[in-house]
Image (cartoon, helix red, strand yellow):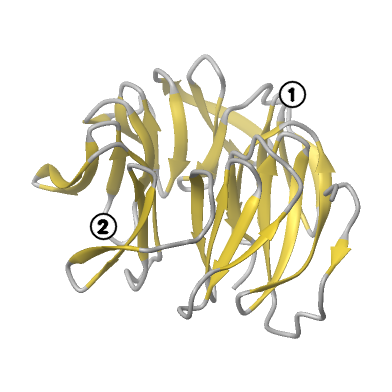
Amino acid sequence: MSATEERSLFEPGPDAVTVLVAAGDGVIAVTVGGDRVGSFGLLERCRARDVAVRGDRVAVATDADVLVGRGGALAATGFGPAVAVGTGDGIVAAGPAGRVSRLGDGEWTDLGTCEGVAAIADGFVAAADGVHRVAPGLPSTGLSRVADVTGAPVPRAATARGLYRLGNGWLDELPGAATVVAGTADGDRVHAVVDEAVLAYRDGDWTRVPVGVRGSVVDVGHGPGTYAVTGTGAFLATVGEGWRTQQLGVDDVGGLAVVSG
């Protein structure tokens, strides 16, 4: 199936949320009710690298520009080509050469540069040269070869050498090649991908979570349920009773973001 046409699978109901997926074909909007996909279709045709949500605003990093909008209408902002978008006292974006800027009042303010930006979240930048805070000068907090970062509820960083949490410096949490980490603000749910296995953190322990699909999970998000997507377009959702899977018909997936819920 092509994601350029909307696919309606069932009526999701009033508790549905929208999850946006950044892919090589564009931004895919997936409507999810509980752990079931109600519909999905192409919201914006572009080469999307990353997607983020702050309040009611959506930001998309594309090969041409950063697109920002509300209610499904996305507009160019003049940033230029971007590899990552996220949040940190506003919408923050990174370009392929490492330039990191914050959007405010319709204008981009440069914060600095870092090497090999991979992700931006919760006031942190994950990059090849470490974790940086989203602030003028991009202060470094350490580590290297960082693939992902989250600030909620305890800052954690996924690196090529393992998963770390921030305490009195960065503390070892899990060994292995960590590529994804995400958590809810209240700490009720935290997930990571280490050595291509999806793990969930609860009551001080990490537990492997079988997701039942081939391909590496490239991002995890939280709303009423937990959502994940693989690089080859398999979308997964759970409300705690096992994972349901829907193939979106896209590949070159970079990430996802939950719009509501």
Q: Mark 2: which secondary structure?
A: loop
The residue at the far left in this view is: 168
Q: Amino acid at mark 1?
A: Ala
Residue 108 % position (x, y): 61, 30
Residue 141 at what x, y percent from top left? Answer: 22, 33
Left or right, 75 with reference to 79: right
Query: Which label sits on residue 154?
Result: 2
Say above or below: 151 vs 108: below
Instruction: State the residue position of label 1.
Output: 64
Q: Give the percent coordinates (x, y) of residue 220.
A: 49, 55
Kind of residue indicated by mark 2 = Val
Quarter of the image holding residue 161? top left
As drawn, which residue projects farthest toward the right?
A: 5
Coordinates of residue 208 in the picture (x, y in percent): 31, 61
Q: Nearer the viewer, residue 236 or 142?
A: 236
Question: Among all residues in the image, which is located at the extreme bottom?
Answer: 14
- The reply to whether residue 175 is visible in this rendering is yes
As displayed, is residue 98 above or below residue 34?
Answer: above
Structural crowding at the residue carrying mark 1, measured as other residues with C-alpha within 10 Å and reported as few (<14), some (14–19) or many (≥20): some
Q: Residue at x 13, y 44 (%)?
A: 172
Residue at (77, 39) in percent of width and height:
26
- Nearest to the observer: residue 123 or residue 37: 37
With 40 as the anchor, is 172 left or right in this view?
left
Residue 58 visible, this angle: no
State if disc 2 and disc 1 touch (CB < 8 Å).
Answer: no
What residue sits 74% from the left and 31% below the top? 47
For label 2, the crowd category at 10 Å Cα-Cα, with few meaning under 14, some 14 to 19 and many 20 or more, is some
Number of numbered discs present?
Answer: 2
Which numbered disc flags the more N-terminal residue, 1 or 2? 1
221 and 93: which is toward the camera: 221
Instruction: State the CA–CA distance, disc 1 to disc 2.
Output: 34 Å
